[in-house]
Amino acid sequence: MDLAFTPEEQAFREEVRTWVHAHLPADIAHKVHNALELTREDHQRWAKILGAKGWLGFGWPKEFGGPGWTAIQKHLFEEECALAGAPRVIPFGPVMVAPVIMAFGNAEQQQRFLPGIASGEVWWSQGYSEPGSGSDLASVKTRAERQGNKYIVNGQKTWTTLGQYGEWIFCLVRTSNEGKPQTGISFLLIDMKSPGVTVRPIIMLDGGHEVNEVFFDNVEVPVENLIGEENKGWTYAKHLLSHERTNIADINRSKRELERLKRIAKREGVWEDSRFRDEIAKLEVDVVALEMMVLRVLSAEKSGKNSLDIAGLLKIRGSEIQQRYSELMMLAAGPFALPLIREAMEAGWQGDAAAGALGGFPGGEVGNAPLASAYFNLRKTTIYGGSNEVQRNIVAQVVLG
């Protein structure tokens, strides 16, 4: 196992770093570095910049219009984007559904859907979880009945992240009740502008609108929107989830947020507390260990060996690290990390650096106001994508035998 980057890989890193710093809008980077809320336009602006360069589908092979990068190049690209303050690529299109379309879709589907994903023009959503079907995804009940050349879809999806922006949604739907639950699931692509599709917001504790419920009431979906074979969707779902759980580990964001934690600790006067620095040091050790785990997978791929089947481990450790750094940021800021008043934030008061100039008031520092929101929001990371308890059982079965 060789974890050292080659001169060619280091040169690639420099190329990416130079390009990102030249093209990433400064206002977006400011928001990311201070955990301020990103709008749909912010996400789309960066996605289209990457798309114009041919880098939004950074994990795609050349035959489908991607850069054809190695696993290590993809890792370096993500790291440089994260450290520069670029928004995380919204994964539902380029990272999740696109590989499924490439692997299991037909040529017509690939020509129809991939260009809009690669350019950043089309916003995709994920339709997996349902009430009562989260970690137990095989129990989905949303039904698709075939009638001639179309499916009639009825049911509900929930926790649909940024579904209010969605133009298309990929869904697991039940097309058969025969045999095991997994054998009756199909993978369907649905236009969210179709009659009968309703998106309802789920407003979070801080007043934010990130997740949604999506209802399907006799929605007509052309049969040509079925990916692969009917009742084989569970196979395609597992292919997608391997991408999702590795993505959830998000080591590069953790490295960026670790540095942000250090800045907050110094700014708020707790850096000199040796006990607090010990907590930061323990977190940094965990971040480095997670990065080594990621690099082990990349090293195996680079040498042509079978990649280690540890997507579950990456998800478990990555999600726990995200929760820990958000907790330490809260502790560092103390009472100034109290939950934000969303109306004041939107009016430009909380998070406004000018407030800090009023007699040196430290709580007016940019980035303090959203800390509680981030802390509460990241409680979800050990639940979504398959809860960590379920993931530990999977790891025990697959890795330990």
Image (tube, helix red, strand yellow):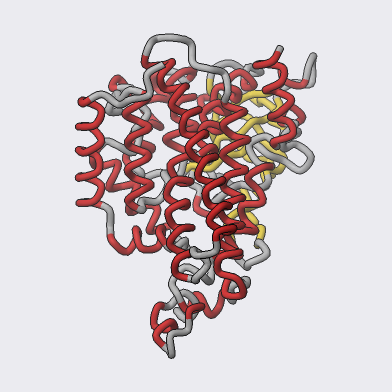
- Residue lying furthest top in this view? 305
Of 159 and 275, nearer the camera is 275
Q: Residue at x 49, y 71 (%)?
A: 268
Of 9 and 135, nearer the camera is 9
Q: Is residue 62 left or right of residue 155?
A: left
Q: Position of residue 242 (x, y in %)?
A: 55, 26
Q: Is residue 200 left or right of residue 224?
A: right
Quadrant into which the C terminus falls: top right
* Residue 248 visible in the current orientation: yes
Determine which quarter of the picture holds residue 131: top right
Q: Residue at x 29, y 41 (%)?
A: 51
Q: Is residue 180 above or below residue 48?
A: above
Q: Position of residue 34 (x, y in %)?
A: 43, 63
Q: Is residue 3 above or below residue 195?
A: above
Quadrant into which the N terminus falls: top left
* Residue 196 visible in the current orientation: no
Q: Residue at x 77, y 21 (%)?
A: 181
Q: Position of residue 326 (x, y in %)?
A: 57, 56
Q: Position of residue 39 (x, y in %)?
A: 44, 61
- Residue lying furthest bottom in this view? 359
Q: Total marks drawn?
A: 0
Q: Is residue 147 left or right of residue 194?
A: right
Of 378 and 147, nearer the camera is 378
Q: Residue at x 62, y 56 (%)?
A: 377
Determine which quarter of the picture holds residue 375: bottom right
